[in-house]
């Protein structure tokens, strides 16, 4: 069944992501409380509509007018975050129902994760929410984000840039950390859901929504266990047909599964079976948390049509390391075609290796470097290019120039430092632009490894990006994942 | 044969690491030349003795008095770096011989890496060096460091802190990048050698030296290929008996080996055989460049006596992820002993899982956290502890407080921000100190995962360190490597 036929559910999730107004019930000035830091992050993110603090005991919270209850709010309230102690949550739900709230996010814990009694409270909670025509994210969730709405409402202070990657996480703290990495590495985020106990909305529902969400380019999933495996698989497949789905499943091993069961109460089942099924559904399955964000960045590149990689490097050692990693990750390094060798012979010293990896033997001339890139990317022998070269090198030069100015201020003047910085910055900008041009012209991915101090993965070039990893192992793992996904697409008649 | 019996060689390498004075032949003000940036880095590192620029065409280089030749230098010169074009190098060697120089580092390329003619030049070079009683590092090397001497003399501008880790690298640019990571992540470096073409001193010689170098706590090796495999294995074994040897071997695969052959000319042989032999020799074999620096940091911990890990976490999701990773890396998570459960029952909410991983269900009370750590570390059921908890959390709190001050400056004043920063800083300091105390008291490693924005692996506590990784996958990989090494030690009758 096409999930879009459940229009009511899809509309509710849409409302959850695009509320016109929000309220935090349990708002507080006490910065040690959830009702405080959730609101701090919401206000700090500059949410694009009214954000009402609700607390009967306060006139003001964080300097904003505070309302004793939802009814007192001057306008409608679409979305409510509840941080009250568990025994008070049902009262708040009643308030939400009376106010005509569309969705609630219950941060509060003390539900099914604590045992049988908590599970009963959770059933009552869901019943009350649904009876009022609302839907629920949580309980026991870290919160959610919808960055295009400037809705940053999690317990974590990370503010990733606005972008096209969405994430569903069955662990709040793991999800929050991925958002922190996204912020650090300039990977733009669209929507983030910490699903908590999934008493109502679950990761399958949200995955179905994101599959058809035009503004989402790739989906990250952290999953510990799902109740309806078949429905989840169908959702993963439908989503994978439309965009990359990068999945970290935990509870892969017996002890991991036991830990997952005690963490969320979900049954995680056999990972081998689950992983096989997920790969068949087209998902890109990863095993390390950081791979999620690395994989997401890969979605900014065209998919490789096959596994044949050209490595272009300024340093021989990196070529060797990259070769091993490619091979160990199922990628191939075909020989360099004679025509490419003939072209490069015109530019490189006579002793260059004429092999793949193409070691440019330290030729830092940007024209030679870009010509070499174009020669391989345009050649039918290669499906993708991995390059360790000029992008990122300007920070090295800048460091040396600063040191030179310190040790010899009269020889290497501040003006010279600035001049060189401008020059290398300009070179690097040109190379970035050229990489983007080559990607667009030939429709093949060029993955950069920037061996520098800059941890950003997405380096902006106008509205485009150069995708640049801090280590060759990251770049190769992601390229291998993309390649596998593209083989799945081809095997399933997708473009 | 004990390598120390070759006292002449060992003394020469010692002289290489501890020169009283150095010179750079080919020194230049042109910041695009090796003779410039090598000298910049040398001066910027504040080498602890005279550093003479040599260039017959300049009166001053980088503001320092420049000498036309070595003979003109006012004092003795122990170590000479040569950056001249290849045809001029032999003349420089003759100068070195006449001056009584002990060792030369030849940066210049154009030797065996370029083909048969270059190989002949290399033979002549070595013959000239050895005839004068000198030894040679290189040619075609990025340079070397000896940080306790403040000798930072590579082509790369990284200045890692002074420390106890030494590295031998058969790729200059890979080695330089590891040094940059070391600097970023606060991993102190002792000695670094880019071995270049290894025309004279090779990685086996240097490994033999470092094995007995009291100031080196762990050795990092990047190896593409060695000529005398048996000698290298003997050196690796002798070194592993004394300290951890972390090895990245490239050319593991057929295409990697081909790339290595064209890069250094070395034959790399079968990796499976090599890896097996290296493991038998006690080396910790890794597969990704970043693992080198992660592994080095692990040497600041006691070795785990076995594979039984306790995970202590403030967040359930991280416990699940950590469990899977432990299992996949050959580590065990035994159940929590009754006595530990009884102690923790007194402190934790009734619904805590009573399982390993010990999920402290968000209890951020540092006393509870430290008590839980002590309960597991002191228990015979566990050989090591992996913890994702309070160390690193203060940066999250600080971010929230800064945001709170921005959105509500009158409610959350700058004084409050500072007060909380002091408080959380104090808590984190206490926890760090407690971790170091527990490690020393019980002689077991406690490996921290700090989910924050701080990339430092070695967090100082007085003269000690908390070892703290930025992802659980790093922490688990290193713990697994240490455990395997300890099993090797036990199997070989070493403590």
Image (spheres, coloured by chain):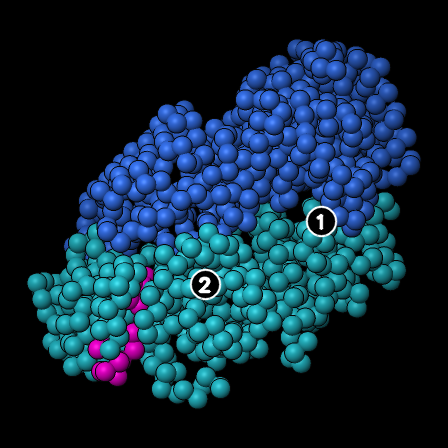
Chain colours: A cyan, B blue
Can you see residue A251?
yes
The residue stretch that appears in magenta: A128-142
Mark 2 and mark 1: Cα distance apart in space: 34 Å
Residue under the image location 36 percent in, 78 percent down: A13
Determine the residue positioned at 77% across, 25% down. B231
In the rendered view, does B25 fall on the left or right side of B369? right
The front one of B455 and A399 is B455
Q: In terms of image quadrants, where is residue A329?
A: bottom right
Q: Say left or right for B45 vs B350.
A: right
Instruction: State the image coordinates of residue B324 (x, y, percent, origin top left).
Output: 49, 52
Q: Is residue A138 magenta?
A: yes
Q: Chain of mark 2?
A: A
Question: Does residue B473 show up magenta in the picture?
Answer: no
Residue A223 % position (x, y): 45, 63
Q: Residue at x 43, y 30 (%)?
A: B444
Residue B424, how many percent across, how many down?
Answer: 27, 41
Q: Which residue is mark 1?
A: A324
In the displayed structure, A128 sits above or below B31; it is: below
Q: Is residue B289 above or below residue B46?
A: below
| Residue A111, placed above or below residue B284 | below
Q: Earlier in the sequence, mark 2 or mark 1?
A: 2
**Viewer-nearest residue: A243 or B416:** A243
Q: Please state the horizontal and vertical placement of residue B183, each as a whole percent of the image.
A: 52, 36
Image quarter where the C terminus of chain A lies is bottom right
Chain under numbered label 1: A
Q: Is residue A450 visible?
A: no
Secondary structure state at the residue bearing disc 2: loop
């Amino acid at each position: 069944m096409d999930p879009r036929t459940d229009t009511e559910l899809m509309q509710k999730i849409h409302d959850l992501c695009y509320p016109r107004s929000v309220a935090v019930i349990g708002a507080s000035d006490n910065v040690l409380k959830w009702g405080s830091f959730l609101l701090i992050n919401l206000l700090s993110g500059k949410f694009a509509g009214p954000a009402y603090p609700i607390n009967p005991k306060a006139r003001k919270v964080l300097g904003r007018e505070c309302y004793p209850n939802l009814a007192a709010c001057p306008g409608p309230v679409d979305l409510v975050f509840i941080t009250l102690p568990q025994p008070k949550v049902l009262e708040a739900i009643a308030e939400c129902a009376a106010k005509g709230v569309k969705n609630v996010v219950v941060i509060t814990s003390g539900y099914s994760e604590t045992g049988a009694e908590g599970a009963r409270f959770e059933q009552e909670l869901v019943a009350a929410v649904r009876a009022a025509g609302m839907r629920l994210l949580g309980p026991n969730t870290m919160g959610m984000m919808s960055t295009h709405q400037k809705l940053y409402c999690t317990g974590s202070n990370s503010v990733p840039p606005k972008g096209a990657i969405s994430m569903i996480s069955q662990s709040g703290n793991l999800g929050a950390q991925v958002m922190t990495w996204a912020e650090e590495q300039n990977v733009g985020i669209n929507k983030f859901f910490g699903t908590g106990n999934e008493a109502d909305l679950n990761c399958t529902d949200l995955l179905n929504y994101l599959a058809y969400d035009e503004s989402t380019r790739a989906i990250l999933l952290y999953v510990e266990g799902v109740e309806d495996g078949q429905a989840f698989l169908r959702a993963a497949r439908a989503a994978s047909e439309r965009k990359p789905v990068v999945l970290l499943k935990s509870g892969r091993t017996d002890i991991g599964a036991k830990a997952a069961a005690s963490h969320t109460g979900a049954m995680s089942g056999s990972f081998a079976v689950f992983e096989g099924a997920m790969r068949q559904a087209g998902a890109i399955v990863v095993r390390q948390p950081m791979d999620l964000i690395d994989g997401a960045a890969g979605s900014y590149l065209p998919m490789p049509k096959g596994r044949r990689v050209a490595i272009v490097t300024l340093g021989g050692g990196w070529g060797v390391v990259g070769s091993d990693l490619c091979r160990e990750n199922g990628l191939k390094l075909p020989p360099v075609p004679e025509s490419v060798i003939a072209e490069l012979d015109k530019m490189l010293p006579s002793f260059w290796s004429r092999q793949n990896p193409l070691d440019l033997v330290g030729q830092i001339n940007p024209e030679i470097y870009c010509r070499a890139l174009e020669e391989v990317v345009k050649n039918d022998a290669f499906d993708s290019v991995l390059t360790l070269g000029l992008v990122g090198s300007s920070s090295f030069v800048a460091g040396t120039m600063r040191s030179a100015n310190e040790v010899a201020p009269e020889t290497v003047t501040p003006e010279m430092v600035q001049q060189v910085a401008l020059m290398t910055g300009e070179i690097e900008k040109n190379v970035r632009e050229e990489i983007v041009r080559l990607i667009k012209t030939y429709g093949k991915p060029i993955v950069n490894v920037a061996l520098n101090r800059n941890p950003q993965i997405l380096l902006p070039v106008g509205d485009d990006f150069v995708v640049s990893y801090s280590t060759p192992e990251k770049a190769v793992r992601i390229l291998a994942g993309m390649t596998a996904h593209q083989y799945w697409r081809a095997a399933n008649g997708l473009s």
